[in-house]
Amino acid sequence: MPLSRWSLAKLAEYLRGQGIKVSPAHLGRILSRAGLSFQRTRSWKASPDPEYEAKAARVLALYRSQPPGGVVISFDEMGPVSLCPHHGRGWARRGRPERHRATYTRRSGVRYLVGALDVHASYLRARLRPTRNGNSTLAFMRQVRLAYPASTRLYWIQDNLSCHWTGAIREWAERNNVELVPTPTYASYLNRIESHFGAIGEFVIKNADHLDWDSFALAIANHIRYRNSPDRRRERLARTQTRPRLTA
């Protein structure tokens, strides 16, 4: 059959051609009894990094305990994002879903959201940038560095994207008491900030239709201010204390 997946109706049609008559509904019951269900596919990835164990152990050790006189920062980018209606989920009257305008013209370009999470303080910083390159990354790193005394060493956890490891970034880090800590190749799950990007996607971008970048940036700033409130940070850190320890 020229199909990339089976529906119950198509499977019943195929079986009829083999001399087996069974209804789609009964096929569903047979498959259910066999432990089969209709599911979305899932992706998987394994890191080919030959130094995976050492890099993962280093990252997890920094997550487990804050180094004396140091701050652990988890950094990455989200995007590109564009100015268009973003569908999502929400509460509405049955049969009356919230409607978004349809648009196929996007004249405002794209933006990238760069973010830095102070892991042990649970404090998030983020900015929208029009480009993703070494200069943009370095400008954001300088902003974050200014938030801490020069004597405080920053342990900057990031992936292996080339614009995170330019010569200018390495030289700046060496001069400014910043240690660049790489995650293993294809191991984004070890970058703590990824889960916070997911929350921004759910609670700022989806179900929204921002008409200009100023309103988009304001929505992100308001969400991060709400997320960084002292009470919420204390609650989040308290939950973290009760979770099982990460191991490499």
Image (spheres, rainbow, N blue to C red):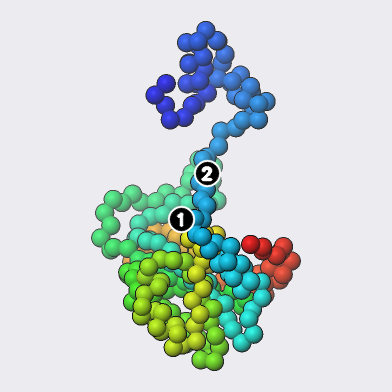
Answer yes or no: is residue 232 visible: no
Identified by mark 1, the residue type is: Asn
Give the camera-side residue of 184 and 32.
Answer: 184
Question: Which of the 4 image quarters holds residue 119?
Answer: bottom right
Q: Which residue is drawn at the image coordinates 31% and 51% (left, top)?
A: 103
Q: Residue furthest right?
A: 242
Q: Secondary structure at mark 2?
A: loop
Label 1: how many Cα within 10 Å (few below 14, some 14–19, many 20+): some
Which quadrant of the figure contains the C terminus?
bottom right
Task: Measuring from the top left, give residue 120's x and y in whole percent.
Answer: 62, 76
**Are the two marked residues, 1 and 2, in contact with CB atoms closer than 8 angstroms?**
no
Judging by the rendered image, the residue that carries numbered circle 1 is 207
Task: Measuring from the top left, give residue 75's x and y in whole percent.
Answer: 49, 71
Q: Which residue is drawn at the image coordinates 50% and 46% (left, top)?
A: 43
Q: Residue furthest front?
A: 50
Judging by the rendered image, the residue that carries numbered circle 2 is 42
Which quadrant of the figure contains the N terminus?
top left
Q: Which residue is drawn at the image coordinates 59% and 84% (left, top)?
A: 70
